[in-house]
Image: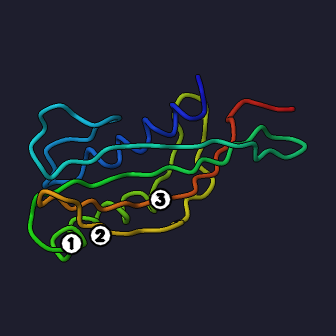
Amino acid sequence: MSASLAVQRLVHGALAALPGFAGVFDGPPADAAPPYLVIGPDAVGEWGTKTEIGHEHRVAVSLWTDAPGMAAAKALLGPVEAALLALAGARDGHRVVTCRLQRSLVIAQPGGWTQGLVEVRVRTVMETGMV
């Protein structure tokens, strides 16, 4: 199983448990009601040691809402950030070692939409992968 997909599944599980969102998607949904979350983009690099195979993931999660103003999006983004920073456990042979905030921002979009964005750095090791 790819390390990237394993982390995406962990992120999805953490976000799906949050109340107040119409859904968590891995791409822009065609007809979802706001507010909703979209996982991605993400980038993965090598982060291993002499004894473990590891990966460093840069994962972005976007929040989309049609609520007016920036404050509403920021209020919704807080629990998303907290859920990501609490990311722990293992999935498909990959275990989370650390999760750190890289950035969080809110952007007013044309048409009355507001986008919130949280980017985290997740470091994982393969549970059974010895070099």
Identify residue type, mark 2: Gly
> Residue tagged by mark 2?
78
Residue farthest to the right, as pictured: 50
Q: Tag 3's secondary structure?
A: strand
On screen, 120 above or below 51? below
111 relative to 47 in the view: left or right:
left
Where residue 45 sits, quadrant-wise, is top right
Marks 3/2: CA distance? 13 Å
Residue 72 image point, x, y percent: 15, 71
Identify residue type, mark 1: Ala
Identify residue type, mark 3: Glu
Q: Around disc 1, counting alpha carbons within 10 Å, would you say few (fewer than 14), some (14 to 19), or many (20 or more)?
A: few
Residue farthest to the front, as pictured: 110
Quarter of the figure that contains the C terminus: top right
Residue positioned 35% across, 35% down in the render: 26
Residue positioned 12% across, 49% down in the render: 34
Q: Which mark is residue 119?
A: 3
72 relative to 45 in the view: left or right:
left
Residue 4 image point, x, y percent: 56, 35
Residue 31 image point, x, y percent: 12, 33
Q: Are marks 3 and 1 in contact (CB under 8 Å)?
A: no
Q: Around disc 3, counting alpha carbons within 10 Å, would you say few (fewer than 14), some (14 to 19), or many (20 or more)?
A: many
Q: Tag 2's secondary structure?
A: helix
> Residue tagged by mark 1?
75
Residue 10 image point, x, y percent: 44, 41
Residue positioned 17% across, 31% down in the render: 30
Residue positioned 51% across, 31% down in the render: 5
